[in-house]
Amino acid sequence: MTSAPASVYDRLAELGVVLPAVAIPAAAYVPFVRSGNLVFISGHIAKRDGKPWVGQLGRDMDTASAKSAARAIAIDLLGTLHAAVGDLNKVERIVKVMSLVNSTPDFTEQHLVTNGCSELLGEVFGAKGAHARSAFGVAQIPMGACVEIELIAEVNAPVVTLASA
């Protein structure tokens, strides 16, 4: 006899993760858009103590620190996904993650930075967290943040509007 899979929220609690509220967009966009069974989560920048986590890889930040920043972004993305869906147990699959890493031209470990996000998604969702991914080095990110990540998820849930989130 196999036991029932753990709730996503039980897994988050085991990991010591508390989901944040949806952040207010800093420009002219919405935090998420639902199209059919896909939820597109807008890019979230790395934050520490509520402020942009500033740094450039290859100049004044190392891969391990930026990987921690990417993990923090994953938590923020999950908070927004929860607001979009109403129940993270309705996530069928994390489809795609796109990561932008603020880096110098000679920095080549963007993929290792992005693992901070990808690994947490795997810990939370198991096989459903395995996703396609892109990791890019860019010259700058809004507000000087070290990393920005966006996410696409497939869900099996009714549409939630921000007013009811």
Image (cartoon, grey):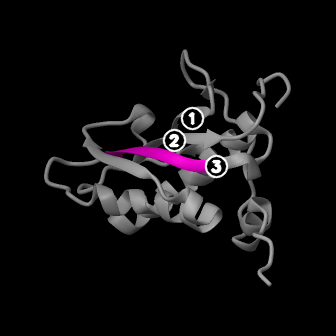
Return the disc, 1 or 2, that comes first in the chain's sequence.
1
Type of the residue with mark 2: Leu
Badge 3: residue crowd in 10 Å (few <14, some 14–19, many ≥20): some
Residue 41: assigned label? 1
Give the residue pinned by disc 2: 151
Q: Say whether marks 1 and 2 touch (CB < 8 Å).
A: yes
Q: Which residues are magenta?
A: 93-101
Q: Position of residue 161 (x, y in %)?
A: 77, 23
- Residue closer to the observer: 113 or 143: 113
Tell me if residue 47 can be seen.
no
Type of the residue with mark 1: Ile
Q: Position of residue 165 (x, y in %)?
A: 82, 31
Return the disc, 1 or 3, that comes first in the chain's sequence.
1
Residue furthest to the right = 164
Magenta stretch prevailing secondary structure: strand
99 in magenta = yes
SS assignment at label 3: strand
Q: Is residue 85 above or below residue 147?
A: above
Give the residue pinned by disc 3: 92
Residue furthest to the bottom = 1
